[in-house]
Amino acid sequence: LLEATKRHDLTGLRIGVLQELQGPGFTDGIWETFQETLDMLRAAGAEITTVECPHMPYALHAYYLIVPSEVSSNLARFDGVRYGNRVVPAGGGTVAEVMAATRAAGFGDEAKRRIILGTFALSAGYVDAYYGTAQRVRTLVIKDLQRAFEHVDVMISPTTPTVAVRLGDQLENPLSMYLNDVVTIPANLAGIPAISIPGGTAEHGLPVGLHIQGPAKSDARIYRVAAAVESLIEADLGQPFYDLAPEVPRVQGARS
């Protein structure tokens, strides 16, 4: 494949496109750019097929129950007593008051949000209904992907449903941020390798990511395919992709 990359020849490479990711939710510019990439890969000899993973639409929901649950249990060790930051209320305080003050000062809004959600999901009477069910969905997603990779070498898709967002634009809308993870989450749940590379531009010249994932222990394959696809895209553009990136105003105080 490395030699084929130099010739822009992808003959024999089987690429899957998830049926479940072709519904609403992706902006038009994203799909137009993605379809152009698919046409380019076909012209290079790759075989493009549609694959089905029926439980994929539930992966995002399962992830945001499993991860907050694990976050809440793992971060319980940061109590301000044994190690890490310690914030002591004015005039002193009990151990519980020190723990509360330490965590209030040490964790950001998103970490606190996940801790609260995870604590609820693991609470008595809810752990099986939420965390247990999410783990069962995770198993179904893993099996879906295993079946899909029996027919294709890799799967590709846009990395996110939209182009890159402006820094800080979605901080007040965490649900919108979570929904942007709909494509990348399944690889995390299944423990399979994946990579995101520049896939072109869409609205206002902003970049579109191209997400490539493969079966377990196929990391080397992912790197080779990513190199081949990126080489094709840059050959089509006639210049390195990063030369097309729009100028971004320098943030005051940021390091060069």
Image: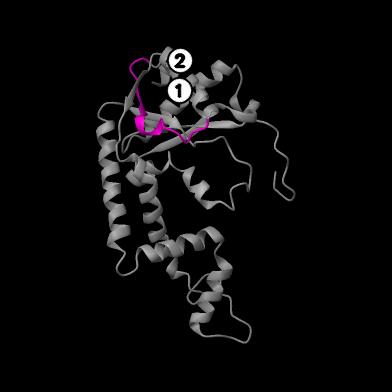
Q: SS at mark 1?
A: helix
Which image quarter: residue 117? bottom left
Could you tell me which residue is drawn at 42 percent across and 60 percent down? 71
Residue 38 in magenta?
no
**80 and 53: which is toward the camera:** 53
How far apart in space, not on screen, are marks 1 and 2 (Cα)? Answer: 7 Å
Q: SS at mark 2?
A: loop
Horizontal and vertical percent position of residue 151: 26, 26
Could you tell me which residue is drawn at 55 percent across and 61 percent down? 109
The label number, if any, that marks residue 228 in the structure image: 1
Which image quarter: residue 21? top left
**Residue range of the region highlighted in magenta in the rendering:** 11-27
- Residue 212 visible somewhere in the drawing: yes
How many circles with numbers are drawn on the protein?
Answer: 2
**Contact, mark 1 vs mark 2 (Cβ under 8 Å):** yes
Horizontal and vertical percent position of residue 189: 35, 46
Amino acid on which disc 2 is placed: His
Could you tell me which residue is drawn at 60 percent across and 23 percent down? 240
Amino acid on which disc 1 is placed: Ala
Q: Residue 39 vs residue 58: left or right? A: right
185 relative to 117, above or below: above
**Residue denoted by label 2:** 8
**180 and 43: which is toward the camera:** 180
